[in-house]
Amino acid sequence: MARIRMVETYLSPKDAEQLTRLSHTTLRRYVRRGVLTNYRTSGGHRRYALSELRSLLAARQRTSPQPRNALMTWR
């Protein structure tokens, strides 16, 4: 039977910002709070796991309130 090896993809902070639409400050805050994990390259650069970022996005989508209809606010 063939073994399947899962390979994780890591994104730079800039790519993580573009994917999540969060600032680098917010990403670092999430790391300090334990919501995300950042990994360091041998050169000391931060990287974020794509699977963790996708999980974060899915969780934020489930918990965010529905946007209000702009037409409903006019009276």
Image: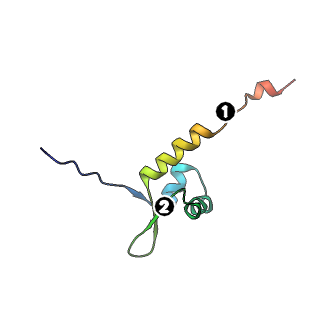
> Measured along the vertical axis of the image, is residue 11 above or below residue 65?
below
Q: At 30% from the left edge and 54% from the top edge, which residue is drawn?
A: 7
Instruction: Kindly give the residue lying farthest to the bottom in the view shown.
Output: 43
Quarter of the image with the C terminus is top right
Q: Residue tagged by mark 2?
A: 37
Mark toward the viewer: 2 or 1: 2
Residue 14 location in percent, x, y? Answer: 51, 60
The residue under label 2 is which amino acid type? Thr
Q: At 84% from the left edge and 26% from the top edge, which residue is drawn?
A: 74
Residue 41 location in percent, x, y? Answer: 40, 71
Secondary structure under tag 2 reads loop
Q: Residue tagged by mark 1?
A: 66
Q: For this rendering, which residue is in front, 7 or 45? A: 7
* Residue 64, picture quadrant: top right
Label 2 or label 1, whichever comes before in sequence order = 2
* Residue 1, picture quadrant: top left
